[in-house]
Image (cartoon, rainbow, N blue to C red):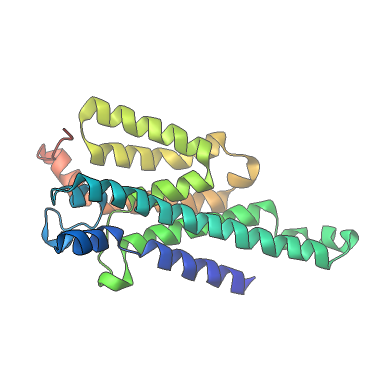
Amino acid sequence: MIKIVLIIVIVSYLLGSIPFGYLLVRIFRKEDVRLTGSGNIGATNVARTGSKGLAIATLLLDGLKGYAAVAFAFWIANTYRFSLVRRFPDTVWDTRRAVMTSQMVFLLAALAAFVAILGHMFPVWLGFKGGKGVATAAGSFVALAPRAMLVAIVLFVLVVALTRYVSLGSMVAGAAFPLCVWWLGPGERATAPILLLIGASSVLIIVRHKDNIRRLVAGTENRFR
């Protein structure tokens, strides 16, 4: 079991730490995106380099790496679970059900989402200075709890449409996602450990927006146009 956890953590971090925004701008524009605007490696700052195409590609790839991390966790956790089912007779498996239940599978998937977001925020390849994790979190959360994520996306769109603040929409959606999982998720996805990991992921996203929060309070935050 420890081996499975370590594999999921390592793979999720490595996937999350791929700095697509930095790589795309470096390859196609021969520039360092960290020297532009906020210095972030995410899609919003990539757009400030003047290339909307690269920004869209960054958004999609950052989301995809989060989705891939959670999908990998589901695959390896379920593979391990089914191997136990085959290894033990039904009567014995019933007594060992706690080893790998559906709750444990989703817990490992939630761990993968958390670590992938950490990887994006603190990539080893860039001196642990990365992005804010919104796109990576969105991809992770779609794989983890698609119905809850759909509600969060609707909230994001509404907030941005009403205020023109992308940062505010991102924070509201991030904060709402754990509540949406608790409200809409099946029982195995709404346990306290799983919600704690999802909540920690949301807190990370909000904390990484601390500069945006200051600008929102001061009334100097840039609006989406």
Q: Is residue 192 left or right of residue 157?
A: right
Q: Where the N terminus falls, by quadrant?
A: bottom right
| Residue lying at 14% horizontally and 54% vertically, measured from the top left | 38
Residue occupying the point 22% across, 50% down: 210
Which residue is painted at 24% across and 25% down in the image?
Answer: 162
User: Picture quarter containing residue 177?
Assistant: top left
Residue 13 location, x and y as percent? 42, 66
Viewer-closest of 203 and 28: 28
Depth check: 47 or 11 in front? 47
Q: Residue at x 90, y 60 (%)?
A: 91
Q: Quadrant of residue 75?
A: bottom right
Q: Position of residue 70 (x, y in %)?
A: 51, 55
Callout count: 0
Whether residue 209 can be seen here: no
Residue 185 as seen in the image, left or right of residue 114: right
From the top left corner, tell me how far across and down residue 130 is, in percent: 27, 62
Return the residue found at the far front: 28
Where does the C terminus fall, quadrant-wise?
Answer: top left
Residue 83 drawn above or below residue 170: below
Q: Looking at the picture, how far across and down is residue 204, in whole percent?
A: 35, 54
Residue 7 as seen in the image, left or right of residue 123: right
Can I make out residue 70 in this image?
yes
